[in-house]
């Protein structure tokens, strides 16, 4: 082999090696910073994965927000650097009617389609009530309303009062002669704005917003609520015949159920 | 004063851009809003960083028309103007690395120990790696670690521990590699080197006037582009020239000047 060619090859291999090493460190850093499951995004944010791919960290949404509710993550915030988020207890989303943060986004990471009603005569009608930034959950053990003390701070603070938070009358079993007026969150309406979390009177908020993925469970689509007529509609797209193949399902139920009994 | 004409002009444009972005957020001025990743001029024209958009695209994002158009304008601007005008005249990190270089010269560090020698082509590897990593990880990879974004966003929205990234660049340039970050590593610099390769603005060199004092080569942060100095007249053709004009102002013999791609000095 000619010496120059060998030299060239060696140099290329060396560069490739360095690039791989650099790539690994770099990639590791990104992976590290990406694991922030508790982050709350502005209204209309695309699902996290698509959001991270498209957000270019320009801060236009942050600048558009008249309440300074949004911030761009700094290194050390333990959130994907440069991407927008909000902390409800400090500064919740006020659910502006015109949602200024969404149209400001140049990349569509904040997607108008996710916060607008069906297009009517070519015009998009923004509707902040469709936002799903997260879901408020209540810790019944610290919420004072659940202890029988009257408090409806979150109920009153909620921009979707009586839809996202309702107050349920319950019998106070402890005293036996009082009522409890307890707040309940409804996931169909709650936008996750966090006004309730901000308003909560306990030392650490007893109602707080979590990202949907974390706050919500998921039941199989086959659990149909028989008392809800339309609930069966969900089965439309579910294939009728599904057999789950596991080592167990090969045996007869009588056999595998009794397997370890004797 | 003549010796610093372009340097002063550069510092003024760099800080003006930075200040206008800052004022956009802090006082709601409409001249420039957003940041170097994506901005709006007078709330009308949108501009985006073409390299960031390219990475976003590789990451699998569906790029909007707005962002694409903005990226196209910026790309066109630097492609036509030429070279790394962005690096020399807009990028805030340039002030940091220039400061490191100044200190380096002041303490004559290059005489104390030999600068670590790394290749200037790393920037192209880093550029390729940015795109590949974006594809694999599904995020704009360079934007996650870019000290440019860190510093720029930092000035506009508060920086926090982002200083660490900027300081790393400063110390890297001061102690490890001369012109280390901008001259060797930065993938955005690599991107603009390629983009501006055929641009209009060039540095022209006249061998007949040159006295071979080599002041221009000494001051140039991208020395390799001035390889013709002392040999033959010509112009800088490499896109790696950041068009800072330092060579022009330090030349006492008027042998180096801003020129254009059509000038007689362009040799093939
Ligand atoms: S809807 Fe209004 S308050 Fe909420 S993040 Fe957007 S701009 Fe801010
Ligand atoms: S405006 Fe869009 S792209 Fe810019 S920081 Fe906000 S979400 Fe990201
Ligand atoms: S329940 Fe809380 S988070 Fe949900 S919409 Fe109401 S105030 Fe917002």
Image (cartoon, grey):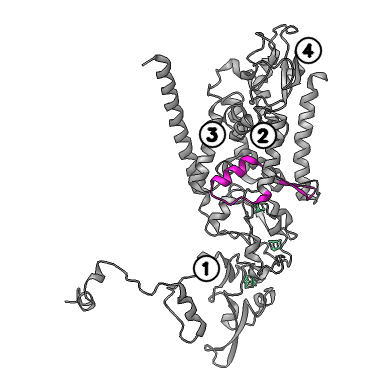
How far is the residue under mark 1 from the one under mark 4? Answer: 70 Å
Give whichever of B204, B80 is nearer the camera.
Answer: B80
> Residues in magenta?
B39-66
Q: Chain of mark 2?
A: B
Q: Chain of mark 1?
A: A
How far is the residue under mark 2 from the one under mark 4? Answer: 30 Å
Residue A83 location in percent, x, y?
Answer: 61, 51
Disc nearer the start of the sequence (3/2): 2
- Residue A79 appears anywhere in the view: no
Q: Secondary structure at mark 1?
A: helix
Q: Residue at x 69, y 73 (%)?
A: A159
Say which mark, if any, is on residue A249. none
Q: Secondary structure at mark 4?
A: loop
Question: Label 3 belongs to which residue?
Answer: B126
Dots 4, 3 in contact, CB < 8 A: no
Q: Chain of mark 3?
A: B
Instruction: Look at the picture and state if B16 lies above or below A250.
Output: above
Q: Quadrant of residue A43?
A: bottom right
Question: Label 4 belongs to which residue?
Answer: B254
Dots 2, 4 in contact, CB < 8 A: no
Q: Between tags 3 and 2, which lies in front? A: 3
Q: Secondary structure at mark 3?
A: helix
Residue B201 location in percent, x, y?
Answer: 73, 25
Quadrant assignment for the N terminus of chain B: top right
How far is the residue under mark 4 from the one under mark 3? Answer: 37 Å
Instruction: Look at the picture and state if B60 lies above or below B103.
Output: below
How far is the residue under mark 3 from the one under mark 2? Answer: 17 Å
Disc nearer the start of the sequence (4/3): 3
Dots 3, 2 in contact, CB < 8 A: no
Question: Label 2 belongs to which residue?
Answer: B93
Q: Residues within 10 Å of mark 2 (few under 14, many from 20)?
A: many
């Amino acid at each position: 082999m000619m010496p120059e060619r060998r030299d060239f090859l060696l140099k290329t291999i060396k560069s490739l090696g360095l690039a791989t090493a650099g790539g690994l460190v770099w990639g590791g850093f990104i992976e590290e910073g990406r694991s922030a499951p508790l982050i709350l995004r502005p209204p209309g944010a695309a699902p996290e994965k698509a959001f991270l791919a498209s957000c270019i960290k320009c801060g236009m949404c942050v600048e558009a927000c008249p309440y300074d509710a949004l911030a761009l993550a700094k290194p050390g915030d333990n959130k994907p650097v440069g991407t927008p988020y909000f902390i409800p207890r400090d500064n919740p989303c006020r659910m502006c009617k015109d949602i200024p943060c969404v149209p400001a986004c140049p990349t569509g990471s904040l997607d108008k389609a996710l916060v607008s009603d069906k297009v009517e005569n070519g015009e998009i009608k923004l509707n902040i009530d469709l936002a799903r930034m997260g879901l408020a959950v209540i810790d019944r053990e610290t919420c004072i309303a659940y202890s029988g003390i009257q408090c409806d701070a979150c109920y009153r603070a909620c921009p979707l009062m009586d839809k996202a938070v309702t107050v349920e009358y319950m019998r106070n079993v402890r005293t036996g002669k009082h009522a409890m007026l307890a707040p309940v969150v409804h996931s169909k309406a709650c936008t996750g704005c966090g006004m309730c979390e901000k308003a909560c009177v306990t030392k650490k908020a007893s109602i707080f917003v979590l990202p949907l993925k974390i706050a919500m469970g998921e039941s199989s689509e086959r659990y149909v609520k028989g008392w809800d007529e339309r609930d069966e509609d969900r089965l439309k797209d579910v294939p009728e015949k599904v057999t789950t193949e596991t080592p167990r399902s090969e045996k007869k139920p009588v056999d595998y159920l009794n397997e370890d009994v004797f | 004063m003549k010796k610093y004409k372009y340097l002063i002009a550069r510092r003024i444009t760099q800080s003006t851009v930075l200040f206008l972005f800052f004022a956009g957020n802090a006082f709601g001025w409409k001249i420039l809003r957003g940041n170097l990743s994506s901005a709006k001029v007078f709330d009308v024209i949108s501009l985006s960083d073409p390299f960031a958009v390219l990475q976003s695209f590789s990451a699998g994002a569906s790029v909007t028309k707005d962002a694409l158009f903005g990226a196209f304008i910026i790309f066109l601007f630097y492609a036509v103007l030429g070279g790394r005008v962005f690096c020399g005249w807009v990028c805030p990190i340039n002030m940091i690395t220039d400061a490191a270089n100044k200190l380096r010269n002041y303490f004559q560090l290059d005489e104390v120990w030999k600068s670590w020698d790394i290749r200037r082509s790393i920037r192209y590897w880093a550029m390729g790696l940015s795109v590949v990593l974006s594809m694999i990880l599904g995020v704009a990879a360079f934007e996650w670690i870019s000290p440019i974004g860190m510093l720029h966003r930092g000035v506009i929205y508060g920086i926090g521990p982002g200083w660490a990234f900027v300081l790393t660049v400063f110390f890297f340039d001061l102690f490890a590699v001369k012109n280390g970050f901008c001259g060797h590593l930065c993938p955005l610099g690599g991107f603009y080197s390629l983009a501006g390769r055929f641009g209009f603005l060039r540095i022209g060199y006249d061998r007949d006037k040159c006295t071979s004092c080599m002041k221009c080569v000494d001051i140039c942060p991208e020395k390799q582009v001035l390889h013709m100095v002392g040999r033959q007249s010509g112009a800088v053709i490499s896109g790696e020239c950041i068009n800072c004009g330092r060579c022009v102002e330090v030349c006492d013999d008027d042998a180096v000047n801003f020129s254009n791609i059509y000038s007689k000095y362009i040799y093939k």
